[in-house]
Image (spheres, grey):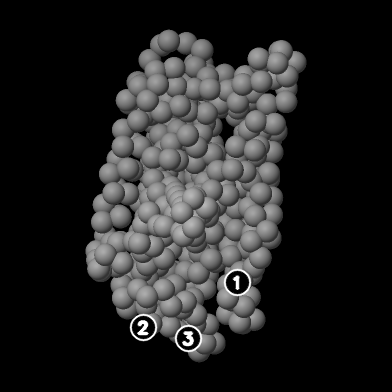
């Protein structure tokens, strides 16, 4: 919003300083600062309001240390995260950018599903919350919207280099030079490419997967791409939801992942850096750095209240939204195949539940009694059962998350 306002001011009134809003770095800095202010300062009033409304968490007794003390802690704190993402993004990002619009939709869509779930749990006193099938319908619907938009929208393209010449002599921050470089060395294509980590020939076209059925089958590439997007959105949002089991775990992990995706957005959306790193150049994706900055600020600011001992829980309002946001960002930036590494914490939490349930059913059928691989699933509860303090568990998971984030960034050059 402010970008368009200052663009108009600079064009017609030539006010000093108005040109700052042309710089993604400046707008990203403003976004993260405002996001931190909203989540940390206004968050205090939201937490107080939630307490007044008696929006308290109902705790199931799982026999975990310190569990009963959490009874009554305000939940639905994900509203703080949503506000701290949406407001800075609307103010500082370009609202005519297809990727920003898609991320705003993702934030509201998944936040609404989580909010309905929390509302049913808290105000309707139904511990089950929103029926699982309705959550899945919501996640699948979002996956379809994201998938079809990215596949069919004319505004979604990647630029392929048509010359072997090096273009690094151009100024990476001069938009006019970047436009000239793009016109001279690159051509836009609608191919639905994605990045394959660790391989030299590191791009694959979803449509080409169907070429085994004949060249005419390529036009139906969306039959491969859209289901992949649906699966990723569903899996990552559920993974984030499962990870939100102890104070600060999901919030800190998400901030680390968001920072990494911000790096990917910056280098993928800048033609000079994309040329230097020999990675896919995605025009207009640089605006997602602003969204990522707001996301990081929202998570870090919320961690102020969510770190042990938590003053507020994000609830499904926050966890489902965070998962949907991370999945959609990775897909837009063509880094969805990096998700098992980048979101390794979410993945292992998901797998621990699946393995626990599967092994229990298998042993019950074979031996007549169910046995467990872990003392409790998801995995963070296993460590709680071993007597480890939840703040130590969260910190160690963050450390692992940082290692995975660094490995994800390193894949830009390891091929």
Please tell me which of labels 1 and 3 falls first in the chain.
3
Alpha-carbon span between mark 2 and mark 3 = 15 Å
Which of the two discs, 1 and 3, sits closer to the camera? Answer: 1
User: In which quadrant will I find the N terminus?
Assistant: bottom right
Please tell me which of labels 1 and 2 falls first in the chain.
2
What residue is rendered at 66% in x and 15% in y?
212
What residue is rendered at 51% in x and 64% in y?
318
* Pointer 1 residue: 128
Relative placement, left or right, of 275 versus 146 is left
Residue 127: x and y in percent read 58, 76
Q: Secondary structure at mark 3?
A: helix
* Pointer 3 residue: 51
Q: Reply above or below: 411 against 66.
A: above
Looking at the rendered structure, which numbered label has been put on residue 69?
2
Q: Are marks 1 and 3 in contact (CB under 8 Å)?
A: no
Front-most of residues 221 and 84: 221
What residue is rendered at 45% in x and 33% in y?
268
């Amino acid at each position: 919003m402010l970008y368009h306002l200052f663009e108009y001011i600079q064009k017609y009134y030539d006010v000093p300083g108005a040109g700052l809003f042309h710089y993604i770095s400046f707008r990203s800095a403003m976004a993260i600062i405002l996001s931190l202010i909203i989540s940390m300062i206004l968050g205090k009033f939201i937490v107080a309001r939630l307490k007044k409304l008696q929006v308290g968490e109902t705790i199931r007794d799982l026999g975990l240390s310190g569990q009963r003390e959490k009874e009554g802690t305000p939940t639905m704190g994900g509203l703080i995260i949503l506000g701290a993402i949406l407001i800075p993004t609307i103010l500082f990002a370009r609202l005519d950018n297809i990727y920003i619009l898609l991320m705003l939709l993702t934030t509201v869509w998944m936040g609404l599903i989580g909010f309905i779930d929390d509302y049913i749990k808290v105000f309707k006193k139904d511990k089950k919350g929103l029926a699982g099938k309705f959550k899945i319908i919501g996640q699948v619907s979002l996956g379809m919207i994201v998938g079809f938009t990215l596949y069919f929208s004319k505004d979604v393209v990647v630029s392929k280099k048509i010359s072997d010449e090096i273009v690094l002599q151009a100024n990476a921050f001069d938009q006019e030079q970047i436009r000239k470089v793009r016109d001279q060395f690159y051509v836009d294509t609608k191919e639905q490419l994605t990045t394959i980590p660790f391989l030299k020939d590191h791009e694959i076209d979803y449509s080409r997967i169907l070429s085994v059925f004949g060249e005419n089958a390529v036009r139906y590439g969306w039959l491969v791409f859209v289901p992949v997007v649906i699966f990723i959105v569903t899996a990552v949002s559920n993974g984030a939801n499962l990870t939100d089991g102890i104070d600060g775990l999901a919030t800190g992990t998400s901030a680390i992942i968001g920072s990494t995706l911000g790096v990917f957005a910056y280098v993928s959306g800048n033609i000079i850096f994309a040329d230097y790193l020999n990675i896919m150049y995605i025009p207009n994706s640089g605006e997602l750095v602003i969204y990522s900055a707001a996301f990081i600020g929202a998570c870090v600011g919320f961690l102020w209240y969510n770190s042990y001992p938590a003053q507020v829980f994000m609830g499904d309002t926050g966890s489902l939204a965070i998962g949907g946001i991370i999945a959609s960002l990775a897909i837009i930036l063509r880094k969805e195949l990096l998700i098992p590494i980048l979101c390794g914490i979410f993945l292992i939490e998901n797998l621990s539940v699946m393995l626990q349930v599967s092994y229990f059913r298998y042993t019950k059928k074979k031996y007549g009694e169910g046995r467990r691989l872990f003392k409790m699933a998801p995995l963070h509860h296993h460590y709680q059962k071993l007597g480890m303090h939840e703040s130590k568990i969260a910190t160690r998971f963050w450390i692992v998350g940082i290692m995975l984030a660094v490995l994800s960034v390193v894949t830009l050059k390891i091929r």
